[in-house]
Image: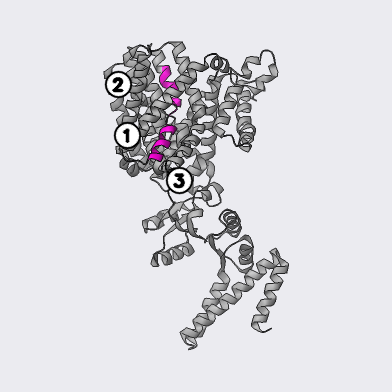
Amino acid sequence: MALSLNSTGFSDALVILGAAGIVIPAFARVRVNPVIGFILVGALVGPFGLGRLVDQAPWLYYLTISDPHAIEPFAELGIVLLLFAIGLELSLRRLWDMRALVFGVGAAELGLSALLIGGALLALGQPWTGAFGLGLALALSSTALVLPMTGINGPVGRPAFAMLLFEDVALVPIIFVLGAFGGAATLASLGSTALLGILVVAALLLAGRFLLPRLFAQAARAKNPELFLAASLLAVIVASLATSAAGLSPIVGALIAGLSIAETDYRGEVESITAPFRGLALGVFLITVGMSLDLGAIAANWQSLVMAVVGVMLLKTLVTFLLLRLIRTTRGAALQTGILMASPSETTLIVLGAAASAGLIGASTAAFWQTVTAIGLTLTPLLARVGKDLARRLEHAADEPPEQASVGTVIIGFGRVGRMVADLLRMHGKPFTAVESDIDAVSAARKDGYNVLFGDASRPDFIDRLRLGHADALVLTMDDPVLSVRLTRRVRGWVPDLTIVARARDTDHAAELYRAGVTDAVPETLESSLQLSEAVLVDLGVAMGPVIASIHEKRDELRREIKLAGALDREPRLARTRLQDLNEAKGL
């Protein structure tokens, strides 16, 4: 049945896609952070914005979100996909290496922040049960906003990720503890949930190790991006449903799915193919945050709200800064991390709801702190900029990311030609990374000890992830003339100084590659002719030295002519001048 123009789904989709496609680019044009843009859009189109005027102006129905609860599942999907992407950037070994940060600094940050915030609220007259619940809720920080700004590497990203990861794991125990204080849960139920959760996580890790490589291998052999996307989303949803059924948060399942895929050969392809969905779903989440902002209530209680926001942020910044200084983090990085972790979290809203359901806090108190949380989330991008500026002043290099190590030579295409290039690079001690779209070829090469990634080089987003700006050279060996020319143009425009060497079918293809910007093009027909000539001369008794010299001379001469042929099409006047100089040098 066709979707009615008056349906809620049609109206909400129009608003969300309009925000993503029109409003957010407009904000970007005036250098407004997209996070703030999405939240402001949510405040505008939500029930406290234009939604109040729908009765007076029915046409506003198509510019508002009539049922905020209807899009909450999409907001949750955005957070799930974010944690999935974080898992893709990790590995189980790396996570184990971070255990001291996660369960040491992470636990201390959450516990001390909750204790100080709860103590302050207790001193202000809040009952101890309410202060306990509010302290735990407000101590949480935003995974959805902080990690995209910091990543998971470097002096800021690594400790921030460790603390946020512990908070995400602790979310379900926090909800159970609050339920126990309200009489809705018992220690026995908490213990059984923890045991079941451990069993489910172990089962997911085991299943991921043996089932995911086979699932993605079938999708890779089909050469169908839609199947690859379907397999990725299937893995995320199954893992999230499994942890939800065990009483854990679905984001734990998403993280495990990402970790499991990161151990396979398909990590890069999965990361690039799910990125658009992740960004849009995260935007929906931010819109829901904006819809909770009641500007009238904020104006009426602005003094209390300002004090609450500033107080929570100062306490959390102080705790994080001191903990990181205790483990000898630089002052600039510790301050920047503390400021980024200062705002409450999207999960704060979940914990506030659990505390209200357990009767620990009243509905009006929960609404007040929900507004504080929404304001804090809106301020997070501004805090990130403030933190970076303060860190720069405190310690000049604290905000600068560490120098990226070179990725060596990147070889795209790992057939017989690519393998020969890799062998010679290894012979001379030069590092390399190879990319191949045939999963069977990737598996065979990895068994032989080659560093080969599975990925589709025709996808621009995958090429962007190869860090070619830090590569020593790019070698194109695939037997696809159109793709090699297209890749050369793209990479040359992006990294103008990179050495690009490409395999060409013939001299015409080589000339086209030179026009596209390669440093050197090697025609197969030319090289086979030179090798044939070398073999004939040696067999006729000509000394090897003069033969090699003449072959090199002939190769250089033909290469100059091919370059000139390419320049003749691109810059005729310059090419004719070069051709004249070449003829004069030959004595013609």
Magenta-tinted stretch: 331-353
Task: State the separation of the CA atoms marked 2 and 1.
Answer: 24 Å
Q: Nearer the viewer, mark 3 or mark 1?
A: 3
Residue 325 covered by magenta stretch? no
What SS does tag 2 mark?
Answer: helix
Q: Position of residue 407 (x, y in %)?
A: 44, 55
Q: Is residue 280 left or right of residue 89?
A: right
Instruction: In this rendered view, identify the residue nearer to me: 370 or 567.
Output: 370
Amino acid type assigned to the residue bearing label 1 in the image: Val
First of labels 2, 3 by sequence position: 2
Q: Nearer the viewer, mark 2 or mark 1?
A: 1
Residue corresponding to mark 1 = 105
Q: Residue furthest front?
A: 393
Task: State the separation of the CA atoms marked 3 and 1.
Answer: 23 Å
Q: Position of residue 4 (x, y in %)?
A: 66, 22
Residue corresponding to mark 2 = 190
Q: Nearer the viewer, mark 2 or mark 3?
A: 3
